[in-house]
Image (cartoon, helix red, strand yellow):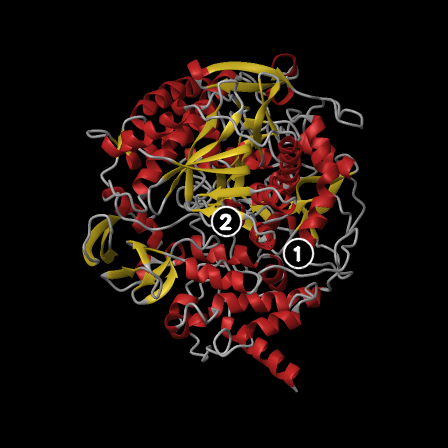
Amino acid sequence: MKVAKRTFDAVIVGAGGAGMRAAVTLAESGLKTAVISKVFPTRSHTVAAQGGVSASLGNSEPDHWTWHMYDTVKGSDWLGDQDAIEFMCKQAPQVVVELEHYGMPFDRTDEGKIYQRPFGGHMSNFGEKPVRRACAAADRTGHAMLHALYQRNVRANTQFFVEWLALDMLRAPDGRVLGVIAMEMETGEITVFQAKATLFATGGAGRIYYSSTNAFINTGDGVGMAARAGIPLEDMEFWQFHPTGVAGAGVLITEGVRGEGGILRNASGERFMERYAPNAKDLASRDVVSRAMVTEINEGRGCGTNKDHVLLDITHLDADVINKRLPGIREISIQFAGTDPIKAPIPVVPTCHYQMGGIPTNYRGEVVANGEPVAGFYAAGECACASVHGANRLGTNSLLDLLVFGKSSGESMIDFIKNEPAAMPEIPQGEIDKALARVNRLNTQTHGADVHETRLAMQRTMQAHAGVFRFKDMLAQGVDKILEIEKQVLQTEIKDKSQVWNTARIEALELENLIEVAKATMISANARTESRGAHVRDDAPDTPEHPNGRDDANWLKHTLWHREGNRLEYKPVNLKPLTVESVALKTRSY
Amino acid sequence: MTRTVKFKIYRYDPDKDAAPYMQDLSVELDPSDRKLLDALVKIKALDDSMSYRRSCREGVCGSDAMNINGKNGLACLTDIDSLAQPITLRPLPGLPVIRDLIVDMTQFFKQYHSIKPYVVNNSPAPEKERLQTPDEREELNGLYECILCACCSTSCPSFWWNPDKFVGPAGLLAAYRFIADTRDEATNERLDNLEDPYRLFRCHTIMNCVDVCPKHLNPTKAIGKIKELMLSRAV
């Protein structure tokens, strides 16, 4: 098969918040930049973020980046790297103001400043009391942000390759990354995108679970490509279950609802979070709230005929507040729960939402493998692990992560490209052939496994074996099951053999990425025999010796999963910030 | 209780079909299959060649716009049980069809880009945010929420006749979004850009755009406001 080649200074894969923030920096610097996206940029999943982006602007009450940093470290259950966390929290006000300058339609305070609302785990004065830190555009913050970033890129003349699916990354024998190989969906044509620097900003892989707030497109393409190219994956056992997905539908209801005064209630109408988090109550961290909800349901206090959900109540709020601050939520609730939240509470359940782990990077966005940056390779956003979210991400830190690390990786790439010779190295033919072989297999495979059924089997296994609460035996069985399903994934068969917009082929290729994420998750989770943040297991219970089941003596370390041989290794958590004192280890309570 | 739902779907694969055709089919749906997109996912599980765009499945990404029983809408926000059967699905009208329900949106985005869809402000940026009162910000409501699904522009006869010359409701809504933004300094240039027999004035207030917008936005009203500004500028 003949493969065309294009060359750029920088190639970005993914046009969500992180990719487009990096693209602004690169394109405005004058470098020849390509952004490859499998959907039109404004259809990327950043669009679905609702509640806000965090920054200690202090527009409504005193706030400080060190308080934000403290909350983030505590939220991460001390698994986050404190240098990266300091970097992110300190940069937050600047990147949010830049976004406002790009045209982001933030809501406003009476003084005309950016409106900020309370959110889970956001506290003032090192955990004392809730603070308004989430900068919001109604409950459509992600939509407003993604469009503002796209618009800024239109202004910067960024070159987009829209509806192209990246197939694999290309590496030189010395490990340097040379670009990606990608397929144009409309024609099925395959092209090599060679670049001096390559950024993965491909988002998360929430679609490994059966019930997920994530879009169909969230299939972990960058994570899968990196794994196939020999890059280890960090902390993949940590998945955030958002407390409030619409029961049955999975669609997200922002934590901003609780920020505006919403209350979770069980079957008897009790505000049960008072028992689990006496201080922060409904605004405790997401892992804490999700576990409390599942405990209520498991102990028979769930709502509805099947007692399988709890209720999110905002009927006590003024209808004007709901229409002004939460209009999108009202629409979603009417559409997907059949309930107008002005009149009746919304049925909700914890739903898979966010991948804390990913491609290991430092705070400059450089991908780090075997303790060294991989030349020419960068990652930012949900596909990357900086690690700022550790074992549990704070609400609104995801949008912040996109801005801060999108920008910092763009800047790192500029520095790197400056020192590169003009001539680009030859791409080894074997690298190209590997990607072509995957496509050719799909074009010719007969008597194979059904893509839809195989994906469902994977999603149901992940849901049952690696959910909100995890069990030793279930995890061990889960590993066997996922490895069994992997064999099917590598032998899927598609009936559609067309070259034109072949969505069957795209879904089969996406499934090959999802299964890498599923393996990394299950194997890493099975091995981590403590409870920490979003990873809580029955054989690591809350004891006086190990409060919350956390075992710092043995497990205060990052997991690194290697695809080859499913090998695990570990690296220390960086407890040392860049300029301030370390946030000392403490038992986590809200 | 499962139920059987009948469909009539536009099919065309240029790789194998000489011409487009309408395919009759029926599919068994579960009670949890509420939205049209749920049904399309079931149909695709049975026939993997069924092609359509989709992503967020909650009406914010704008991928799954199509013509549903003669009216443009998003599959993910349309209740199956609200539709008369057989449910007839066609690609968005007025744009070239690539395959099945997937249209070529190049012309649509070209028009969006033509209005300079970004805030123009050449004053030195302040250290903090540019201030805007809550009332000034309120002016952007009903404008910034557009998801670029193209339901409106592809329901507009003026856009069908002149997709290369008439900006269309989505692009004009965006144009007014920037005119209405107190931070934008390019109102005059934006009005100049639209002062043309086609770009703005081909809107004949047929109002199909308002009727189909899945986000309940009102491009006709925005177009009216641009026309008013042009008029007041002329006198």
Asked if A537 appears above or below A241 in the picture, the reply is above
The residue under the point 35% across, 38% down is A507
Q: Position of residue B11 (x, y in %)?
A: 24, 55
Closer-to-camera residue (B148/A253): B148
- Point out the tag, 2 or 1, that comes first from the N-terminus: 2
What is the x, y in percent for residue A285? 63, 36
Image height check: is A19 above or below A492? below
Circle nearer the viewer, 2 or 1: 2
Q: Residue at x 54, y 25 (%)?
A: A535
Q: Secondary structure at mark 1?
A: loop
Answer with left or right where residue B89 lies relative to residue A170. Answer: left
At x 71%, y 42%, the residue is: A92
Could you tell me the amino acid type at mark 2?
Pro
Q: Residues within 10 Å of mark 2 (few under 14, many from 20)?
A: many
Q: Which residue is mark 2?
A: A41
Q: CA distance from mark 2 to mark 1?
A: 20 Å
**Which residue is the site of mark 1?**
A106
Question: Looking at numbered disc 1 in the image, what kind of residue is underneath it?
Answer: Phe
Chain bearing mark 1:
A
Q: Position of residue B233 (x, y in %)?
A: 65, 81
In the rendered view of the protein, which quadrant contains the C terminus of chain A?
top right
Q: Residue furthest front?
A: A423
**Chain where mark 2 sits:** A
Residue B92: name its quadrant.
Answer: bottom left
Q: Secondary structure at mark 2?
A: helix
